[in-house]
Amino acid sequence: MRAATLCICLALSAAILAADDHVVQFDRGVDFRAIKTFSFRPSVIDSERPELDSQLVRANLTAAIRTALVARGLTETAADGDVFVDFNVSGQDYSIGPFGRAHPIPPGRGRAGRRGAGESGMPVDFTEGVLVLDLTARGSGLLIWRGVYRDSERDPSSFAKKLPADARKLLDGYPPRPR
Amino acid sequence: MRTIRLTLLAALAVVGATLVLADERTIQFDTSVDFRTIKTFAIAPGRVESDKPELDNRLFLLELQDIVRTTLTGKGLTAVTDAADVSVAVVVTDADFSVTRRQTGVGIVGPGMRGRGTALPGSGPRPELFTEGTVVIDMMRSGSLVWRGTSRDEERSGPGLARRIPENVRKLLSEYPPKHRGSNAVAPTR
């Protein structure tokens, strides 16, 4: 009986904590097998948190994407690949108010950390991070593949640590098969 | 054993209630139009009004337009680029919400806890973020709206919404052509 109750509590907790989600979108008119080379373009990390807006995060994420694409038979070139790869990482901090409601903390606030006062005095209770990974065709300039990974974590450093794995998950199904 | 089953059932109901978010669809149409005479359609430029990268991109709109094309073609209409009987446009909008949820406790009568039954404690208030996505499919003939399908869906994440909206477009178009009922509105379906 106790085991059953424990399982129930775990199931409830899992339902409440399940916060990761991702989606992959692609142009069904593109033959992805014909894409042989890729080049990185400058990417953006849109966060004021030093745990996210860091050269190390950028380098680790770039390395994970490079490894995943090379493992799928693509070759990196300096500037004129068949597709351009770029990613955008952003983080939105939230503060949980006295009545349990989550309020997004406007930019410029919450820099002092999870329980730090920040400029606004609003403590940061959790961060919703978003990774957007794009492949753009060099010839047409059109977006042909996009992966979006959303992750809610208690602090941005957890999100930063998971970014390379998130990118790998997005690229798991690459190249997509046309329906 | 029976108590455990009841407890599990109650827990599943609680989890289900936690996870289920609203989803509704409405179809409206001009009852004076004979939809059997509509043979061709053109895809009009649609739009996505959202700042979510999984919604606001050409791939997502292309997917929705592809579903419209495939579904209507499957219903005997022909896609054309010029002089179509109707033009079909898809518009997607979204809005974010922050709410709190409380879970009330559940008591189950039975032999557990020395014959006093079992209690699942309540929880909350806890914060919950969700996104409401609305998709509108409009069919225009000679500048007049003749058919509109509206679907509203609440999901916990943008990727969830990006997966659900294509399904909702299919569901809306599954109700085309409309059956005349003497009213220009079909009751919302959940």
Image (cartoon, coloured by chain):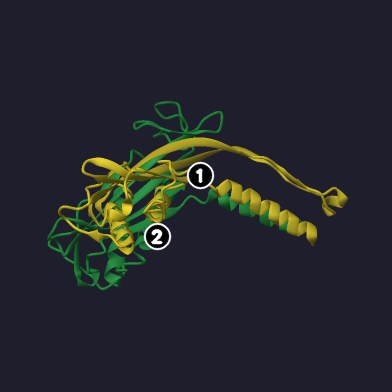
Q: Quick check: B156 left or right of A78?
A: right
Q: Colour of chain A?
A: green
Q: Quadrant of residue A142?
A: bottom left
> Crowding at label 2, few (<14), some or many (≥20) Cα neighbours within 10 Å?
some
Rendered residue at 22%/69% (across/down) = A31
Q: Chain of mark 2?
A: A
**Distance between mark 1 and mark 2 Cα atoms:** 32 Å
Pointer 1 residue = B22
Task: In this rendered view, identify the residue nearer to me: B90 or B49.
Answer: B90
Is the residue at mark 1 from the same chain as the one at mark 2? Answer: no
Q: Colour of chain B?
A: yellow
Tell me where residue A158 appears, x and y as whole percent.
44, 49
Q: Quick check: A138 left or right of B141?
A: left
Mark identifier at residue A165: 2
Q: Could you tell me the amino acid type at mark 2?
A: Ala
Q: Quick check: B8 left or right of B156?
A: right
Q: Residue furthest right?
A: B115
Q: Secondary structure at mark 1?
A: loop
Rendered residue at 65%/51% (across/down) = B13
Tell me where residue A28 appears, x and y as whole percent.
26, 64
Tell me where residue A53 appears, x and y as whole percent.
32, 44
